[in-house]
Each structure stands twice: as structure tokens, then as C-alpha cells.
Image (cartoon, rainbow, N blue to C red):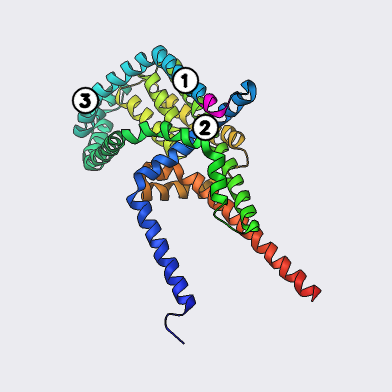
Amino acid sequence: MSLLDKNTLRILFTVLATAALLAFVWFARKPLLAFLFAMLFAYMLDPLITLLQKWTHANRGIAIGVVYLAMLGGLLTVGLAAGPRVLEEGRHLSEAAPELYNRVASGSIALQVGQARGWSQHTQQRVQQFIVGHREDVLSSISAQSSKLTQIAGNALWLVLIPILAIFFLKDKSHLARSIEGLLDNQRGRRILSDIMSDLDEMLSHFVRAQLYLAAISGAVYIATLSLMRVPYSLALGTLGGLMEFIPFVGPLVAGALILAVSFGLNYGHLALVLLFLALWRVLQDYVISPRVLGGRVEVHPLAAIFGVLAGGEIAGVAGIYFAVPVMAAARILWVHWRQRNAQVVNTESETTLKS
């Protein structure tokens, strides 16, 4: 028997092709991520464009242009109305950040907060010693998060390209799907691929719109509640909390931690109420609102989703965190179709055996 028989060559070719594909994905990760985010952005706008086409009977290109112009006008209107205050609070918050950083580094924040809340001298000293003893861990964590934000800001060009690339997805999505189906010669294979792409399309469309709804709801609740509680920089913190809702599971935790840290650092007098609000809102959002908004189309167990988010963060950073849930939902769809196909093959073989 030859060492390089057909089966060995087939396996070797599959391994090399997989390695080449993974290498390509790694080296071209920035443009690939831009295309993926552009695709999700297109999914977010597609219902509006389809609805506009239905109402006006205009061609798709004109509908896309109208929706883009309306979106730009809406952003400008909101920016002019609320933007100055958000920017002003953001500027004051950024100016206060270095002082807050120094107070954490020296441990003096424990004395200031303790005096404002009536802590005993012994408690203040113990908290200060604890902060000073873990200063390196705290400062290294702050530095790591700052470097990540700087890296994201350095990739701003790719963010500008996302709405531009989304135009091509919006205009040629059906043509692209037919082109992919045309790669298969087998009619049955085309039908299976069409079913898989249809399920993926429905899942991604629902996921993107659900994330948008959840972010809008969360941002409105954060801004309204924090403003009523007179939390410092409530508009900036509430806006950030709504934006962080786009990152499943991890984003809300980071937003809540930041709101608590700012409230604590600026000696806000009702910290327990802020903590209670964050806990109650998280329970309401995760167990009441989110299941009803997401529905049953993104069928990923919460424990599996948390594991996927953590693993995605380790593998691909912020992008891995965001794409973890849709990737796991897509893997589930592929697994279901693969099992259905195997079951059909087994049934066909059983029927053939019985007839013979």
C-alpha cells in the first residue's frame, strides 16, 4: 500500500487548505472585520430600505440613498440637540480623570470618600492600605484599558469604511447569495445551502435589530434614571451605557463598573441607590426585556454565550466579544442542518434497503 494514497492526499490537502484559510483570516483580520461590521450595519438598515421600496415603489439604489440621507439628518439633529451637553460632560469627565487617577494611585481617595461618608479613621486607613497594596494591579488594568481604547481610535479609518461597504451589501445581497449558491453544481446541495443561508440571514437580521433596540432602551433608562438621581455626568455615562449594550454580557458589566467608579470617585452621596438601580436594571434587561426582544431566533444558552464571549475576547478582543453570540448561533444552525441532512441520508438508505 502506497504511503501517499488518495485518502492520505485528501486529508493532507484538507489540513493544508484549512491552515492556509486560518492564516489568511489572521493576516487579513482588519479588512475582514470591517466587512463583517459592514454586513451587520447593512442588516440594521435593510428593513427600512425594504419598507421604503414597498411604500414608494422606488428602485433599491434610490431607497438606499434616501435612508442614508435621513440617517445622516437624524444624527445631525440629535448631535446638535444633545451633542454639546454630552461633549461638555465628556470633556469635564476627561479633565477629572487624571486627578481621579492620582487619587487612586496614592490611596487618598479612601480618606476623601471615608470623610464624606462618615467612616471611622481606622476604616479609612484600612481601605487606603488595601488600595495602596493593590495599586499596581489597579493601575496596570487602567493602563491596559487605555491602550485598548487608543488602538480602537487608531483604527478609525475602518469605522469610516463600514457604512460605505454596507451600501454594496444592501444593493447586491440577493445577487451575492445567488452567486454563492451557483458555486455548487448539485441541485440538492444548492437547496441545502439556500436553506442554511436563509436561516443565517434571518438570525443575523434579528440579532442586529434586537441589539439596536436593547441599546436604545438601555441608554434611555440610564440617562433618565441617573439624571433623576443627580449622578454626576449622567448624560455622558448614560450614553456610554447604551453604547456598551452592543457588546453582549461584558459591555453592560463594564458600563456598570464605570458608573459606580465615577460615582464613588466623585463622592456621590447615594452610591447604594446607584448599585441597587444597576442590579435591578440588569435583572430586568437580561431576564425580561432581552428574551422578549431577541425571541427564539438566537437560540444560545446564557452559560454558553458567556463562555463564547470570554473566549472571543481572548481570541479577537472587542470584535471577538461582539461576534461571539452570532457565531455560536450560526454554528448551531449549521449543526442542525448537518444533522437533518444525515437523518435524511439514513432514511433514504433504510428505504432503499427495505425495497431491495
Residue visible at 61% across and 42% down? 297
Give the foreground label among 2 and 1.
Answer: 1
Q: Nearer the viewer, residue 92 or 343?
A: 343
Q: Position of residue 185 (x, y in %)?
A: 59, 58
The amino acid marked with disc number 1 is Leu
- Secondary element type, mark 1: helix
Q: Nearer the viewer, residue 277 or 34?
A: 34
Tell me which segment is drawn in magenta: 59-64
Q: Position of residue 166 (x, y in %)?
A: 46, 34
The residue that disc 3 covers is: 99
In primary-sequence order, the first of circles 1 and 3 is 1
Seen in the image, is 339 located left or right of residue 8?
right
Is residue 301 visible to the viewer in this orientation of the structure? no
The residue that disc 1 covers is: 69
Q: Position of residue 109 (x, y in %)?
A: 24, 28
The residue that disc 2 covers is: 44
Badge 1 density bin: few <14, some 14–19, many ≥20, Cα 10 Å: few
Q: CA distance from mark 1 to mark 3?
A: 42 Å
Q: CA distance from mark 2 to mark 1?
A: 15 Å
